């Protein structure tokens, strides 16, 4: 546990080696999500798995974080441990943070994005209908006579991640999911591996192809019959792919 800017950040360090690997988990997850991956990598590399602020054992932010705020935390961790030219592996939301960090600081040796967030699509009409319905119902059920039904009615709206978050993290979630990182991707110079489950419905595989178009040096590995947690759905294949990608040229 380290303290950065009056915030406690949990960092799990394993293994030894000349190559340093930073692992960034998805929304609602923690370093535990990468336990099996760390067990494999720690035989050859030094791994730093970080509980992002608001998750795991790390403190919550004191205000709604943006992706840039999360990237700044990664920068502080890297400086604290004096990590040189790390490899970053980011899953989902962790991939979003990895994209922003790599674009801002350009000291990353290789980047692995697993079912990563970062592409914002144009919202369909039904989305706006749901948003305005939510706002109207929130006002109606704030009336004293209806207040006791408020939580039950409003619980039908929003994603699982949104429902499970407290007020501050809900504000953070809304902030980060509306950040499209296509412009940031153009600033990434390091080799990038995009690993995706063909059955991922949270961040569809089409996002991988969009990212590839905006990245200077990127390749896609598809894991068939795998969903949003493709690296766990077919762990042996994922680890084999990572081994090849991390092998020195």
Image: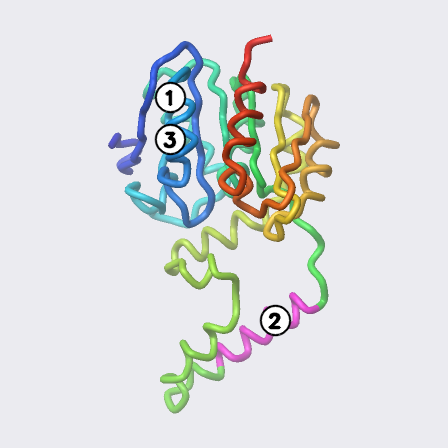
Magenta span contains residue 98: no
Range drawn in magenta? 126-139
The prevailing secondary structure element of the residues shown in magenta is helix
Q: Which residue lies furthest to the bottom in this view?
A: 145
How many residues crowd mark 2 within 10 Å: few (<14), some (14–19), many (20+)?
few
Give left or right: position of 90 versus 50: right
Residue drawn at x 55%, y 9% as measured from the top left: 248
Sequence order check, earlier mark of 1 and 3:
1
Give left or right: position of 180 versus 142: right
How many residues crowd mark 3 within 10 Å: few (<14), some (14–19), many (20+)?
many
Alpha-carbon span between mark 1 and mark 3: 11 Å
Between 16 and 167, which is closer to the camera in this rendering? 16
Residue 184 location in percent, x, y?
63, 32
Residue 66 location in percent, x, y?
48, 43
In this picture, is 191 found above or below 238? above
Give left or right: position of 245 versus 172: right
Label 3 vs label 2, nearer the camera: 3
**Proximity of marks 3 and 2: CB atoms separated by less than 8 Å:** no
Q: Mark 2 points at which residue?
A: 130
Residue drawn at x 69%, y 21% as measured from the top left: 217
Secondary element at image label 1? loop
- Picture disc at residue 49: 3
Secondary element at image label 3? strand
Quadrant of the rendering where the C terminus is positioned? top right
Q: Mark 1 points at which residue?
A: 42
């Amino acid at each position: 546990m380290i303290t950065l800017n009056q915030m406690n950040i949990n960092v799990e360090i394993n293994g030894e080696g000349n190559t340093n690997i930073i692992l960034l988990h998805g929304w609602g997850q923690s370093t535990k999500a990468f336990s099996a991956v760390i067990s494999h990598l720690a035989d050859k590399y030094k791994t730093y798995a970080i509980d992002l602020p608001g998750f795991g054992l790390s403190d919550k932010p004191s205000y709604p974080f943006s992706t840039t705020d999360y990237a700044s935390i990664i920068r502080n961790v890297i400086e604290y441990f004096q990590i040189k030219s790390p490899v970053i592996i980011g899953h989902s939301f962790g991939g979003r943070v990895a994209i922003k960090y790599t674009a801002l600081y350009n000291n990353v040796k290789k980047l692995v994005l697993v079912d990563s967030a970062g592409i914002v699509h144009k919202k369909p009409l039904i989305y706006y209908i749901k948003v305005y319905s939510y706002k109207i119902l929130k006002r109606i059920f704030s009336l004293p006579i209806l207040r006791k039904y408020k939580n039950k009615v409003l619980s039908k709206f929003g994603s699982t991640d949104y429902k499970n978050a407290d007020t501050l993290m809900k504000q953070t979630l809304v902030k980060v999911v509306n950040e499209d990182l296509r412009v940031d991707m153009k600033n990434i110079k390091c080799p990038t591996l995009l690993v995706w489950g063909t059955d991922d419905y949270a961040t569809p595989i089409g996002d991988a192809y969009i990212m590839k178009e905006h990245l200077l040096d990127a390749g896609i590995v598809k894991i068939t019959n795998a969903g949003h947690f493709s690296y766990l759905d077919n762990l042996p294949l994922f680890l084999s792919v990572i081994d090849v990608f991390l092998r020195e040229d």
